[in-house]
């Protein structure tokens, strides 16, 4: 398998899947969100998400960046 230079960052974080600190590949991802019908402004908004994938078990955590 070819090794290409990743554009994500490697960080050591706690992994709920492994139950210990493991290396994670962290990247940012912009996702379009459809605000639900309860929301009066039903528009798509682009939200930045922080995606962190455990390099040991592959568990992926997605966390919204701007949860005010
Ligand atoms: Zn893990």
Image (cartoon, grey):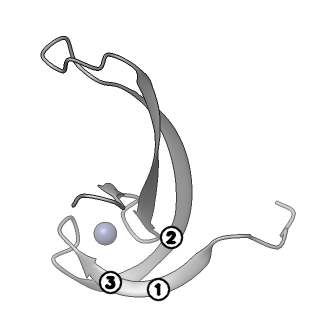
Q: Dot 1: what SS? A: strand
Q: Residues within 10 Å of mark 2 (few under 14, many from 20)?
A: many
Q: Is residue 8 left or right of residue 66?
A: right
Image quadrant for the C terminus? bottom left
Q: Residues within 10 Å of mark 1 (few under 14, many from 20)?
A: some
> Which mark identifies residue 30?
none
Q: Specify the farthest residue to the front.
A: 40
Q: Are marks 1 and 2 in contact (CB under 8 Å)?
A: yes
Label 3, label 2: how far apart the Cα atoms are: 10 Å
Image quadrant for the N terminus? bottom right
Q: Are marks 3 and 1 in contact (CB under 8 Å)?
A: yes
Return the residue at label 1.
11
Give the image location of residue 45, x and y in percent. 44, 33
Q: Is residue 3 left or right of residue 60?
A: right
Using the rendered view, name the quadrant where residue 54 is placed: bottom left
Q: Dot 3: what SS? A: strand
Say whether disc 3 or disc 2 marks the residue closer to the N-terminus: 3
Give the image location of residue 9, x and y in percent. 59, 79
Count of numbered circles on the image:
3
Depth check, front residue: 46 or 31 = 46
Q: Is mark 2 within 8 Å of ligand 1?
A: no
Determine the residue positioned at 83% across, 69% down: 3
Q: Residues within 10 Å of mark 3 (few under 14, many from 20)?
A: some
The relative height of residue 19 versus residue 48 in the rendered view (above or below) is below
Q: Dot 2: what SS? A: strand
Return the residue at label 2.
26
Q: Are marks 3 and 2 in contact (CB under 8 Å)?
A: yes
């Amino acid at each position: 398998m070819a090794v290409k230079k990743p554009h994500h960052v490697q960080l050591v974080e706690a992994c709920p899947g492994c139950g210990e600190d493991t290396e994670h590949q962290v990247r940012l991802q912009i996702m379009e969100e459809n605000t639900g019908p309860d929301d009066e402004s039903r528009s798509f908004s682009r939200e930045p998400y922080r995606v962190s994938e455990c390099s040991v078990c592959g568990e992926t955590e997605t966390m919204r960046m701007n949860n005010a």
